[in-house]
Image: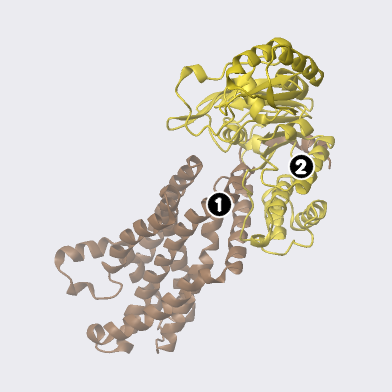
Amino acid sequence: MVHQVTKKISPNTEWAVEARGLAKAFGANRAVNGVDLNVRTGTIYSVLGPNGAGKTTTIRILATLLRPDAGTARIFGHDVVKEPHIVRQLIGVTGQYASVDESLSANENLVLFSRLLGLGRKEARRKTAELLEQFGLIEAAKRPLKQFSGGMRRRLDLAASLIAQPPLIFLDEPTTGLDPRTRAQMWATIRQLVEAGSTVLLTTQYLDEADQLADRVAVIDRGRVVAEGTVDELKASVGSSSLQLRVQNSQDIADAREIVEQVLQVRSNVSAEAGKITAPMANADSVADLLIALRARGISLAEISVQKPTLDEVFLTITGHAATTNASPESDPSVMPEEVAVR
Amino acid sequence: MNVHTTRDAAARLKNHASLGQTIRNSLTMAYRGLLKIRRTPEQLFDVTFQPILFTLMFTYIFGGAISGNVPNYLPVIIPGILVQTVIATSIVTGVQLRDDMEKGVFDRFKSLPIARIAPLAGALLADTVRYAIATVLTFVMGYLMGYRPDGGFEYVVIAGVMVIVCSWAVSWIFAFFGVIARSAAAVQGISMIVLFPLTFVSNAFVPVETMPDWLQWFVNINPISHLVTAVRELINQGKFGQDLVISLAGAAVIVAVFAPLTVRAYMRRV
């Protein structure tokens, strides 16, 4: 065998992921346009954004599946472009669409991946049995995957990513399309992974998923990180809840908006549907003040509600535009996301 | 779960797969190919029916016209049919590879710390089973029709192995098309255009002397002709001739050129 240069990763590498200015374009579409990410070892980090924001492309670059056009990314200090083979030994990837072999059974899939990862015949069978048990797939182990439900497929996919017990696991939208019960199971599994010492980088479209799992969150939009911080910091920036208010007479809307901004001390938005004002709220208690102020001005309300912020509102607040699919980014510079750093 | 063991092992991380690992990974991927064939046996339709049908058709249609009668034609046509059928089977390798690469599982293969060439080499290796089936069936058909090669059984086996090796080499060409083409149908189309003239403008079915001079020139440099001649010499005369050397050298050149090209195209395609 040829002598090969071996490198050490120091066991106390602080950063699992360090990405600087990652960029990737597909034709005219700048899928990723200058993404910076720092993921501390041993944490769950969530990349939050709508469809087409660049989440999957970012993960694919970090997982060595895609070469970035610009920027650098390091996994435990190893460059994804220069040392891809080393990086692949440190990561597990679970794609948005199950990356398992549809023509084989669950059992055959796990044995195949175990063998590829260098486990012996016996060891591969033992590991497969262990993972099938852990992910509740024993009964379905020998059935062809065509008969698997979406949840079973995801579980198998995740199981396949854990064979080598990689210190860093990428999960691309791990719960999209899952029913609530299966989703809760997936969350429990992800928490267990981190308790066992792994680092998890996951993407999601759901704020509550990031809320439930993540230590830190990056909000990504049109290929850029538009906000980054802990879940609490992010929430504080959009308000812990969201006010929705509809006036009876649409000519009152400007006045109503002014009062809302005054009382709540925030920026509000008027939605396309006539007469609907939305605004972030730090404190649900201030609704009382708001109602009094509106009554004092003689403005009648058609509807008022206080809700938990949705991803849409996070987006509206941070970027000033709605979280729609970014298939065709608008060219109007006035709607370009402004950089809001939440630190 | 114990992540610390992984961390300790990380001290020995290498940035390249060793030769041993490459071979192990390729064999595992070949095992996957065999599992797939077992799960979908209908994939074997072409390699079972084509040899049976073609051998019967060509022998009885051309036998009388070319060699006077069927028994005299068998030593000419069986090597020809063998090479034509098995080489044509290698097109399917490219088509299936294209199909396979569309699937999510290839993403996982790419994200695993395995030799880059393994998913390709494995698929191609597993397909030698298909070539073997086609080879055996062609010889069996010949035998049933009364063909008794003078070279004897061992030379038939040697010829069969040589055809399989050469087809495996040729399958790298179609694998290359498979990797660069947009769809499986495109692979099929390109491959047929390449292969059809090659197999028919050769000495596989008719004596070269009956062709016009300019065509003879091409037939004589056609690698398929060399392969057919090599098989004829082996099984009819038990002779290791010059054409055998040319065929094997040609196969080696094809692999040397197309394996790296295919792997490079495969790596770039994401």
Work out which quarter of the rendered image holds the C terminus of chain A and state it. top right
- Dot 2 falls on which chain? A
Separation (CA) of disc 2 from disc 1 = 24 Å
At horizontal 47% and vertical 18% (from top left) the residue drawn is A333
A319 vs B196, left or right, is right
Give the side of residue B146 with respect to residue A324, left or right.
Answer: left
Q: Residue A101 falls in which quadrant of the image?
A: bottom right
Q: In which quarter of the image is the N terminus of chain A?
A: top right
Q: Where residue A300 sits: x, y (%)?
A: 68, 21
Vertical position of residue A106 compared to residue B111: above or below? below
Identify the chain drawn in brown.
B
Q: Are the residues under badges 2 and 1 in a single subunit?
A: no
Q: Please give the label number shown on residue B158.
A: none
**Three-letter code, disc 2:** Gln
Numbered-mark total: 2
Q: Can residue A331 be seen in this view?
A: yes
Question: What chain does badge 1 belong to?
Answer: B
Circle 1 packing at 10 Å, graded few (<14), some (14-19), many (20+), is some
Q: Residues within 10 Å of mark 2 (few under 14, many from 20)?
A: many
Determine which of the numbered discs, if any, sits on residue B103 in the image: 1
> In the image shown, does A179 or B89 lie closer to the viewer?
A179
Vertical position of residue A301 compared to residue A151: above or below: above
Q: What element carries label 2?
A: loop
Position of residue B177 measured from the top left corner of the image (x, y, whole percent): 41, 52
**Which is nearer the eye, B231 or B241?**
B231
Tell me residue B83's x, y (percent).
38, 70
Of all chains in the rendering, the one displayed in yellow is A
- Residue position for label 2: A165
Secondary structure of the residue carrying numbered label 1 = loop
Q: Is residue A97 left or right of residue A235?
A: left
Q: Position of residue A160 (x, y in %)?
A: 71, 49
